[in-house]
Amino acid sequence: RGLNAERGVVAEKQLGVEHFGTEWEERDLEGKWRLIYTTASDVLGLIQLENSKLVQVGDIFQEFCGDNLQNIVLLSTPFLLQPAKQGDCDGGLTLRVLQSWRRVGPRTIAVQFNEAQLGEVQISDQLEQIITPAFLPRTFLNMRILQFIRGLNLKVPLRSFEKGTENSGAPLSDGTCYHLTYLDQDMLIGRASGSGGTFIFEKVIEEV
């Protein structure tokens, strides 16, 4: 997803795809997109946590719904939580960053960060056996501990930003602009303003 990729090769192919980019409709963004490549240092720093062997970083998504946007990261800790592996696991812990967005140019959106949430805990089978052993009576306290862990949901309000004027084309004050350089039904390519990096996503087909 960017750690071990040959950046020069990816950048060359990315430019080739972006050459075909055209203005898009806002409805084309709707749905969930899975990150497949990035050069963003903050995201790569998160992915590098896997090198510690203490954290697993599964799929990373962006999900657009109306004027709301979520960054979703699936995480896990070996032996304590359900695994987080790319493509086939829901993870043992979910980090969500809730945002608002608006269009400020033909291919540009401005983003405001609203809240970070950490929850949706799925403990491992081994840990559940320790908390509520199958061969011993499950006491009220055992069940309350299990219920508390599963219901854990930490919320951290992120700094509020004042919006620029609606027609100014400016980003939300101190916020971030993303230039969506290519978008079709299968692929989304964006570049963050400044040195924020590039992002390549694939569309997730939700099962009915």
Image (cartoon, helix red, strand yellow):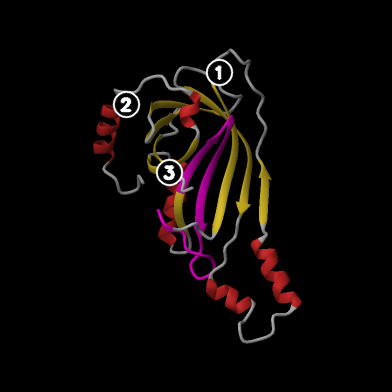
Q: Position of residue 76 (x, y in %)?
A: 51, 60
Q: Position of residue 177 (x, y in %)?
A: 50, 26
Residue located at (69% from left, 84% from top): 137
Toward which corner of the image does residue 179 lie, by quadrant? top left
Circle on res. 18 = 2
Q: Please tell me which of labels 1 and 3 falls first in the chain.
A: 1
Image position of 112 with respect to 93: above or below: above
Residue behind mark 1: 170
Determine the CA span between mark 1 and mark 3.
33 Å
Real-space CA distance between mark 1 and mark 2, rounded to the nearest whole angstrom: 23 Å
Give 173 or 208, whichever is nearer the viewer. Answer: 208
Extent of the magenta region: 60-88
At 67% across and 24% down in the image, what residue appears?
162
Instruction: List x then y, in percent, for residue 132.
Output: 64, 78
Q: Nearer the viewer, mark 1 or mark 2?
A: 2
Amino acid, disc 2? Glu
Tell me what residue is drawn at x 25 percent, y 36 percent.
8
* Discs 1, 3 touching: Cβ within 8 Å: no
Q: Do the residues bearing badges 3 and 2 touch, measured as CB atoms within 8 Å?
A: no
User: Residue 202's mark?
Assistant: none
Asked if the stretch drawn in magenta spans residue 35, the answer is: no
Assess whether residue 79 is covered by the magenta stretch: yes
Give the labeled residue for mark 3: 205
